[in-house]
Amino acid sequence: MKFSKEFKEAVLHLSEKEKDKLLIRLLKKDKNLVNQLYFELLDDKSLEDRRELIEEQIRERGREIAQEAKSLNQLKVLTSFLSGDIAEHVRTTKDKFGEISLTILLLTTVIKNAEELFEKTHPVHAQKFCIYVIARSFKILVLLQKMHEDILLEFEDSLPELGKAIASEHLLMKTAINHGLDVNWLILENNIPEDIAEIQKEVKRMGFLR
């Protein structure tokens, strides 16, 4: 939302008491803002500390949900819950690096621990989960393309690991091909297309990744 110059000036000229009242009212209505301010002003954990906690949670819960889920459809739902934890972490801390690294970790962990589910699931019933993985992989590539090239070195192991995990499952690989994702973009070094965002948009425009 954009505010006019006049509105901003009017707010800035409010008394300190009026500003305090407005701030408290806003905080009561915006949980995300509360979390952001708590992290910036009071939290004794660093960004890296918070990221490591989420990593531990993903490794543990990722294995558990992959082994406990009765179907790939159920696994997709459970994976979405963990993805929600990542999203909340990013909203609170503005951790762009973590948004990528944690999502890679989540997808890789779940795929590697879901071999039995892939073996016993009919392709029709695997579709939602497979599309979810491929759509998230596209998003990872788009986010990486926006990062400084030095940052890409931090993913030289984890990104290919995700690509190989996808390639190891026939249903995922077939979905990747059908939805325009070349797993070599994940596996091979410096192989992300410069126009990956446009590729993603075109794939979506054609009705895929849904």
Image: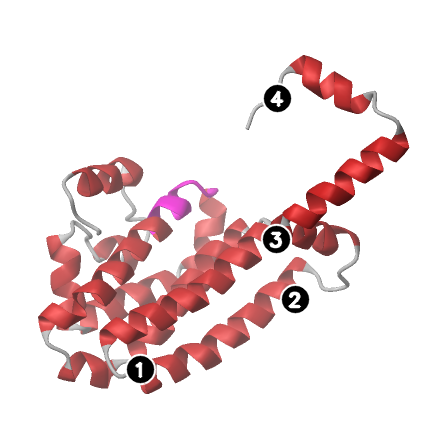
Please name the amino acid that badge 4 sits on. Answer: Phe
The span shown in magenta is: 141-148
Residue under label 4: 3
The residue carrying pointer 1 sits among few (fewer than 14), some (14 to 19) or many (20 or more) residues within 10 Å by Cα, namely: some
Please tell me which residue lies in front, 60 or 81.
81
The reply to whether residue 98 is in sight is no
Tag 2 residue:
49
Dot placed on the residue nearer the N-terminal end, 1 or 4: 4
Element class at badge 1: loop
**What is the spatial separation of the Cα atoms under label 1 and label 2, in whole angstroms?**
30 Å
Circle 2 crowding by C-alpha within 10 Å: few under 14, some 14–19, many from 20: few
Q: Considering the whole magenta stretch, tell me its main secondary structure.
A: helix
Q: On the picture, is 27 further left or further right than 58?
A: right
Q: Amino acid at mark 3?
A: Thr
Look at 30% across and 74% down and name the residue there: 75
Q: Which residue is mark 1?
A: 69
In the rendered structure, which disc, 4 or 2, sits on the residue that comes first in sequence? Answer: 4
Q: Earlier in the sequence, mark 1 or mark 2?
A: 2
Point out the frontmost of discs 2 and 3: 3
Circles 1 and 4 in contact, beta carbons < 8 Å: no
Confirm whether the magenta stretch covers residue 37: no
Image quadrant containing the N terminus: top right
Mark 3 highlights which residue? 92
Instruction: Say which label, 4 or 3, has the lower sequence index.
Output: 4
In three-dimensional space, the C-alpha distance between marks 4 and 2, rounded to whole angstroms, equals 35 Å
